């Protein structure tokens, strides 16, 4: 289905791009939504090059498409239009005066069992602004009626899922091969993403908020 893009410009330097289907129909409930920090293209390309060094020696079931790299700020799950629109309105409001800020890539990590992790990721250096923005978005979504994960926020960029190697996984070996540098980048966009299961890339930006 063809999509039409509507751009709305707000005060305080914030611009929002909203994409919707041509007939203005509601999004179906068999998909998920999440707010995330958008990564610049050069950082996505850098991380893709890192995964190219890793994927032959460290078998994971799925290596993410570089277009899908992001830092999740609030995972909404399925969402009806009214709740989603309320969350969007609240998030737009709390980000209206937020300026862009700098982040730095950190070393690779993993979630799950030490010898067979479910997620391979790279982190970012601790940055107060990132945690502040995540908290504002999180609470905005809760106020809109969403029940969100209560685990502490751990900013990360997922690179791969589900280790399938015959030999035990070694994070030390991954870090040696990956050799992630302390690349700096500007965080300038927050987006609402929609998932498309079975597709690659799997995530579509349906709303983009530009920080000042």
Image (cartoon, helix red, strand yellow):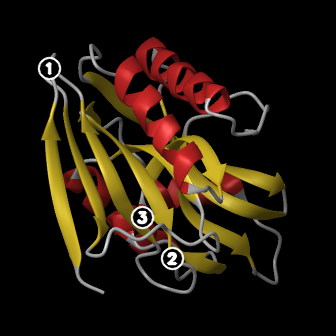
Q: Residue at x 21, y 56 (%)?
A: 41
Left or right of 23? Residue 113 is right
Q: Nearer the viewer, residue 33 or 41?
A: 33
- Whether residues under marks 2 and 3 lie with C-beta atoms below 8 angstroms apart, the answer is no
User: Which circle, 1 or 2, is nearer the viewer?
Assistant: 1
Placement of 32 over or under 73, stated as above or below? below
Q: Could you classify mark 3 by the number of other residues whose Cα lies within 10 Å: few (under 14), some (14-19), or many (20 or more)?
A: many
Q: CA distance from mark 1 to mark 2?
A: 32 Å
Which of the two marks, 1 or 3, is nearer to us in this view?
1
Looking at the image, residue 179 sits to the left or right of residue 154; the answer is left
Name the secondary structure under disc 3: helix
Which residue is disc 2 drawn over?
196
Choose between 5 and 38: the one closer to the eye: 5
Quarter holding the N terminus is bottom left
Vertical relation: 208 (above or below) 202: above
Query: What element does badge 1 sit on?
Result: loop
**Which quadrant, please, contains the C terminus?**
top left
Q: Earlier in the sequence, mark 2 or mark 3?
A: 3
> Can you give x and y, in whole percent of width and height, for residue 138 in the image?
60, 28
Q: Which mark is residue 11?
A: 1
Can residue 91 be seen here? The reply is yes
Disc 2 crowd rating (10 Å Cα; few below 14, some 14-19, many 20+) is: some
Residue pictured at 41% horizontal, 32% vertical: 89
Q: Position of residue 50 (x, y in %)?
A: 40, 62
The location of residue 69, given as percent across then percent down, is: 42, 58
Judging by the rendered image, the residue that carries numbered circle 3 is 68
Q: Nearer the viewer, mark 2 or mark 3?
A: 2
């Amino acid at each position: 289905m063809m999509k039409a893009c509507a751009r709305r410009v707000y005060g305080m330097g914030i611009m929002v791009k909203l994409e919707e289907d041509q007939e203005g129909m509601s999004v179906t409930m068999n998909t998920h939504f999440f707010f995330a920090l958008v990564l610049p293209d050069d950082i996505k390309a850098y991380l893709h090059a890192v995964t190219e060094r890793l994927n032959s020696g460290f078998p994971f079931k799925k290596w993410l498409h570089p277009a899908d790299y992001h830092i999740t700020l609030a995972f909404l799950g399925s969402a009806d239009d009214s709740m989603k629109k309320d969350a969007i309105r609240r998030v737009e409001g709390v980000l209206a005066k937020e300026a862009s800020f700098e982040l730095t890539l950190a070393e690779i990590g993993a979630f799950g069992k030490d010898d067979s992790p479910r997620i391979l990721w790279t982190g970012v250096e601790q940055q107060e602004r990132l945690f502040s923005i995540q908290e504002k978005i999180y609470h905005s979504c809760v106020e809109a009626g969403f029940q969100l994960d209560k685990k502490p926020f751990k900013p990360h960029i997922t690179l791969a899922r589900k280790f399938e190697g015959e030999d035990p996984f070694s994070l030390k070996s991954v870090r040696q091969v990956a050799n992630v540098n302390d690349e700096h980048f500007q965080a300038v966009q927050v987006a609402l993403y929609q998932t498309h299961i079975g597709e690659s890339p799997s995530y579509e930006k349906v709303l983009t908020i530009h920080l000042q």
